[in-house]
């Protein structure tokens, strides 16, 4: 069994693709081992439970065991978007 810390953590600044906004990035605001809140440069706050994906191959490239940023399907289930910091922080504290 692998140690809980035997994985690659999310970066403090992540690039978010697939949104239709070129070069969209999000900056880490606060996190624990189980949850995180990021602020996107388009004035959106994203709050989510941290997911860990096992090592494996994806599109012909090998990836280590790692934390992953939420995908579209995660929103409303383990991830949420907010337009203001107060609502985002409230959700962050609730999960």
Image (spheres, rainbow, N blue to C red):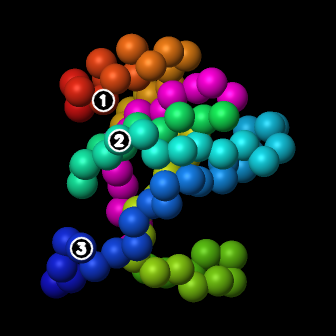
Magenta part of the chain: 42-54
Q: CA distance from mark 1 to mark 3?
A: 22 Å
Residue at the spot of label 3: 5
| Left or right of 34 in this view: 88 | right
Residue 46: give x, y in percent of width and height: 48, 33
Q: Toward which corner of the image does residue 6 lie, by quadrant?
A: bottom left
Q: Which mark is residue 53?
A: none
Q: Residues within 10 Å of mark 3 (few under 14, many from 20)?
A: few
For image coordinates 54% across by 44% down, the residue present is 27
- 63 or 16, nearer to the observer: 16
Residue 66: give x, y in percent of width and height: 41, 70
Q: Closer to the N terminus: mark 2 or mark 1? A: 2
Q: Toward which corner of the image does residue 77 lie, by quadrant?
A: top left
Q: Is residue 75 visible?
A: no
| Left or right of 27 in this view: 80 | left
Magenta segment, prevailing SS (helix, strand or loop): strand
| Left or right of 2 in this view: 55 | right
Q: Which mark is residue 30?
A: 2
Q: Is residue 46 magenta?
A: yes
- 46 or 56, nearer to the observer: 46
CB contact under 8 Å: marks 1 and 3: no
Residue at the spot of label 1: 92
Residue 50: give x, y in percent of width and height: 34, 50
């Amino acid at each position: 069994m692998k140690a809980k810390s035997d994985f690659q953590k999310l970066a403090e600044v992540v690039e978010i693709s697939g949104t239709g906004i070129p070069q969209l990035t999000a900056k880490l605001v606060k996190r624990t081992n189980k949850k995180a809140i990021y602020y996107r440069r388009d004035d959106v706050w994203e709050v989510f439970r941290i997911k860990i994906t096992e090592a494996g191959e994806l599109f012909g490239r090998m990836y280590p065991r790692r934390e992953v940023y939420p995908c579209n399907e995660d929103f409303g289930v383990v991830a949420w978007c907010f337009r203001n910091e107060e609502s985002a922080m409230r959700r962050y504290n609730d999960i």
